[in-house]
Amino acid sequence: MKIFTINPGSTSTKIALFEDETCVFSKNVSHEAEKLAEYEGISDQLPYRMETIRTLLAQAGISLEGVDAVVGRGGGLLPLEGGTYKVDEVLLDHAVRGANGVQHPAQLGPQLAHAFCSQYGGQAFVVNPPDVDELQEIARMTGIRGVDRRVHLHALNLKETAIRHAASMGRAYEECRFIVCHIGGGISVSAHKNGRMIDGYDIVGGEGPMAPTRCGSVAVSDILRYAEEHGVAETKKLCTKTGGFVSHLGISDAIELTGRAKAGDRYAGMVWDAMIYQINKCIGSMACVLGGRVDGILLGGGMVHSEDLVQKIRESCQWIAPVSAYPGEFEMEAMAAGARRVLSGAEAAKTYSGISVWGGFTYGG
């Protein structure tokens, strides 16, 4: 199977070509912020990103002739259950306009996959986009009538990590109960039960632990007070751009932060330890969601390269279940694996309905 994967990011585009399970080519190209600023909306970047990818392939002497599938990182979609989805007219339309109201480069993924398949053939897919929402019903209710919980998580990497770990145990993902964390530029903590991500923290909305650029959960009264002083727009930025490490120290690099801490900067050390402390609290809450019956606590993402972080999580959470570290990300491999499962017949491709999986509670008068 020849599978081409595309992952558009805020400042980069990653591509990889797989032949069966082997990655035969990969490239990550950075984009100048000034160049991207020339485009009014995310979808307006499509011709530029297309040309960038074509140039990379030409420089490497690679042709996509005979490709079986092209997989793009999904985005801009309404809440949906996990799986591999065909890029059809409805999904493409929602990706183009960002139907979920969140403008993110990931919504270029389906558009790029569709464009390359139109030229070279093959099937276009998205796999476990950030819009995956499999919350159990009780996890959706809040203390405000008419305000229900929805989540945005690193679904692609979370599910791939769980699938890989289950396979290492000789079991299927659908048979297991895991707490899975993605700890990188953003931090997701989630509970997985029998193949579904039944609870987790809405990291775009400000839930969960603080992260390099995200404030994490803060008391509502404190947020209101901050908004009164700084305005709603600046307060919203704390959720995804200016919170966490950036708010405290003006940096977002974990390596720089820990370097400062090792050099004796007590403030940097406290920020680092507080982040890990908050991750541990979230892991504990997910253990309760799973009734204490947990097959493993799985850690993925770039910051998991830190032995200090992994050790501190083990010290606090090993009593719940064994802690396993999967440093880095498997996003390109995860996209290829999702397409491969469909092409091999192991899994059926899903059709995006264009309707949110959650329409609100239907009782209560």
Image: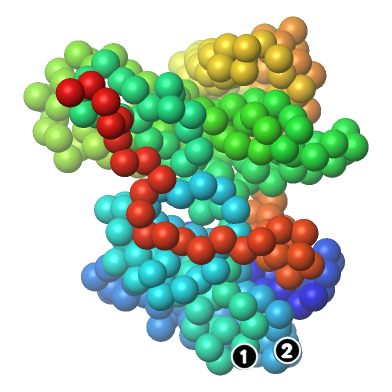
Q: What is the quadrant of residue 231 in the picture?
A: top left
Image quadrant for the N terminus? bottom right
In contact (CB < 8 Å): disc 1 and disc 2: yes
Please tell me which residue is depicted at 35% across the width and 71% down the height of the picture: 93
Q: How far from the left and from the top, in percent, is residue 62?
A: 72, 87
Q: What is the quadrant of residue 310 in the picture?
A: top right
Indicate the secondary structure of the residue bearing disc 2.
loop
The answer to whether residue 345 of the structure is visible from this angle is yes
Q: Is residue 34 left or right of residue 111?
A: left
Q: Residues within 10 Å of mark 1 (few under 14, many from 20)?
A: some
Q: How far from the left and from the top, in percent, is residue 56?
A: 62, 81
Residue of label 2: 66
Indicate the secondary structure of the residue bearing disc 1.
helix
Residue of label 1: 120
Q: Amino acid type of disc 1?
A: Tyr
* Viewer-nearest residue: 60 or 164: 164
